[in-house]
Image: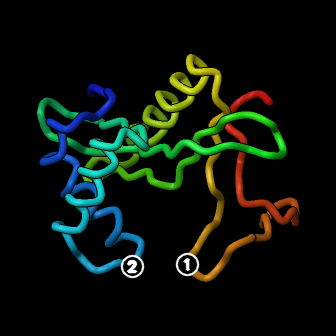
Amino acid sequence: MQIRLASAIDLDNLVPLFNAYRQSLGQASDPLAAREFLGARLRENDSVIFLALDENNAVGFIQLYPSFSSILLKPLWYFDDLYVTPAYREQGIDKRLIQKAQELALEAEVMAVRRTHVSASTSVVLDEHSGDRTVYELMGPV
């Protein structure tokens, strides 16, 4: 299993994964819109995408978006795009993708955060364990 940064040459492999990811979240299949969206992200270099490959077959991805934190006074990358095809789940690929994202964030000295429990109908969510009104889970030292 290889996990590496995606580039424009990976667009054909990414589109079916991204489309399946969106469908898993209740969105209608729209490969053309997925291609346009991902193509723009790769062209504009305004997100970081890691791709998991089994031989030449793309089986998962994680996408990070750059931003800033007023609270932490630091740049950060957040993600809420993580997907592994059903046939490859339960093999730790999701954890390996997250680990790669964390490693790159450490190298770039950027805080990595993950949205938690976000749905289309919520803007601030109640953490089910602590009761905190939080939207992000820190994935690195502050």
- Camera sees residue 86: no
Task: For mark 1, give the secondary structure.
Answer: loop
Residue 26 is labelled as 2
Q: Is residue 141 left or right of residue 82?
A: right
Q: Nearer the viewer, residue 66 or 136?
A: 66
Amino acid at dot 1: Ala
Tag on residue 4? Answer: none
Q: Position of residue 68 (x, y in %)?
A: 68, 43
Q: Disc 2 vs disc 1: which is toward the camera?
A: 1
* Residue at x 63%, y 56% (from the top left corner): 115
Is mark 2 in CB contact (under 8 Å) with mark 1?
yes
Residue under pointer 1: 120
Residue at 14% in and 30% down: 55
Instruction: Give how far apart the Cα atoms at labels 2 and 1 are.
Output: 10 Å
- Seen in the image, is 111 located left or right of residue 85? right
- 114 over 19 or under it: above or below: above
